[in-house]
Amino acid sequence: MDTSLLLCDYSYHYKSFNHNLKSGLQNYLFRLQTEGSCEVISGGKVYTLIGGDLLLLQPGDDYQLTVKDPPTKGRLSSGDYYLFCQGSWIDAWWKRQNRPVTNRIGTDAQLISLWRNLLLEKRRDSLEADEELKDVLLRSLCLYIDRAITENIQTDRKGSATLKLKRFIEEHATVTFKLEEAASYAGLSLSRAVRLFKEHYGKTMIQYAIEIRLKAAVEQIRYSELTLEHIAETCGFASYSYFHRVFRTHFGISPLEYRSLHPLPKLEYF
């Protein structure tokens, strides 16, 4: 394998804690703060991490982690996912772009799911563990981290509200949702949400949702045997007639004609 997952786990601190590695790290360290806060010192700089902050360090970096008692009376709480890894693929990925030591990427469900799956696979007995699966999961986590960092930069440029609108639509396009719900999720009034989305992306929220629905429908038409009526329903169209009309307007042919031009690939048995 081109990657090696050396250690992957979740830690929770309810008492003050200090770990100092002055001699330098031997491997890459990824650390995602999920709850509470901590302080990290590396390269002579002090970083305060709160929930949603990702720390990235490379071999040779010094590393000191401190979880302090709260300044006022209260329960100390600090939780994080962390992993140590190495490998030629990780080396190449690291050199692909410059990444800050700390990155505000949030703790969305997909990111946490990837990390948890890595953790669970690492905990399996060595006879049951799937090295290829760990390799794929680790690569996926690295690529997802890059996407999250990029989106954070886009958020700074475009404004977090418009990016939240876009993500809400992507997550809910194939189910029935109201524009008011998207606006509320982004903390905006409906009129402002509609205007900002059109300004940033050059299309309305409805147009973007339809694009996603059509893409999902095309994939199901080409690679499944589901009826066209069922595809229309599962892809978020209120009725087949509406789906038929939108599909023909976008592609110039009906869903049935499209399916006839793209028959399912035949399976070959040996």
Image: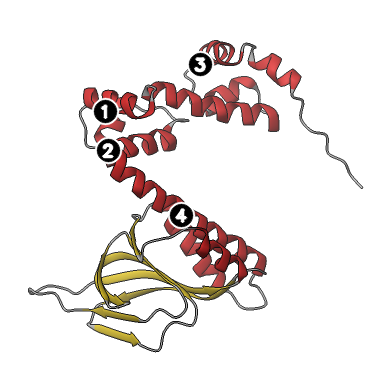
State the CA–CA distance, disc 1 to disc 3. Answer: 27 Å
Tell me if residue 145 can be seen. yes
State the CA–CA distance, disc 4 to disc 3. Answer: 38 Å
Depicted 247 relative to depicted 39: above or below = above
Q: Name the residue under label 2.
A: 161
Please report whichever mark, 2 or 1, sits nearer to the chain's N-terminal start: 2
Q: Which amino acid does label 4 sit on?
A: Asp
Left or right of 239? Residue 188 is left
Mark 4, other Cα within 10 Å: few <14 / some 14–19 / many ≥20: some
Q: What residue type is labelled 1?
A: Ala
Q: Do the numbered discs 2 and 3 sit on residues whose CB atoms are within 8 Å?
A: no
Q: Do the numbered discs 4 and 1 sit on residues whose CB atoms are within 8 Å?
A: no
Please report whichever mark, 1 or 3, sits nearer to the chain's N-terminal start: 1
Q: What residue type is labelled 3?
A: Ser
Of circles 2 and 4, the one toward us is 4
- Residue 193 is labelled as 1
Q: Where is residue 3 in the image (x, y as percent from the top left)?
A: 61, 69
